[in-house]
Image (cartoon, rainbow, N blue to C red):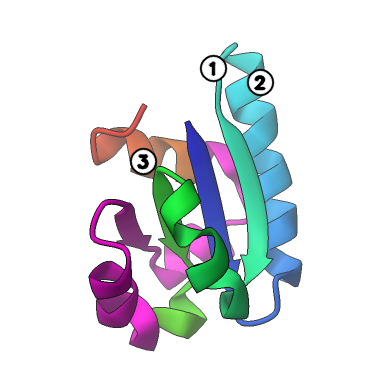
Amino acid sequence: MKIAIFCSGGFSTSLIGAKMQKVYDAEKKDVKVDAYDFGMVDEVGDDVDVILLAPQIGWAFDQTKEGHPNTKVILLTMQQFGSMDGQVLVDVLKEKGID
């Protein structure tokens, strides 16, 4: 499974993505987590299974869902994103049936 995390600059998401990757690696899951600047969403959005949007780009949720109808799009809350905890975000995905 491929997961892409997007934010306005790509910096905070790269940290969170690395923490998520460590959780998946520890669970021996075949998951690849990458972080991108939101400007890349149209370039990579159809090549991933899940798009996670940081709360600061929540305005783009509907447009991202429309542009990538075959990809699961999830908008993270400030609390989830602000936790900077990979396990928290992996658990959010599990709650949404993505494992």
Q: Residue at x 57, y 76 (%)?
A: 38
User: Compared with residue 94, is residue 18 higher up or lower down, i.e. above or below?
Assistant: below
Q: Contact, CB < 8 Å: mark 2 with mark 1?
A: yes
Q: Is residue 4 left or right of residue 58?
A: right
Gap in angstroms between the C-alphas marked 1 and 3: 13 Å
Question: Which residue position is annotated with label 3?
Answer: 93
Quadrant of the rendered structure where residue 31 is? top right
Q: How crowded is mark 2: few (under 14 residues within 10 Å), some or many (20 or more)?
A: few
Q: Check disc 2 and report the residue beneath it.
A: 25
State the residue in front, 83 or 99.
99
Which residue corresponds to the image point at 38% horizontal and 67% vertical from the top-left? 77
Q: In which quarter of the image is residue 5?
A: bottom right
Q: Name the residue under label 1.
A: 29
Please identify the residue farthest to the bottom as the structure is shown.
59
Q: What stretch is highlighted in magenta?
A: 59-87
Position of residue 81 relative to residue 31, above or below, is below
Residue 73 in picture, x, y percent from top left: 32, 59
Could you tell me which residue is drawn at 46 percent across and 82 percent down? 57
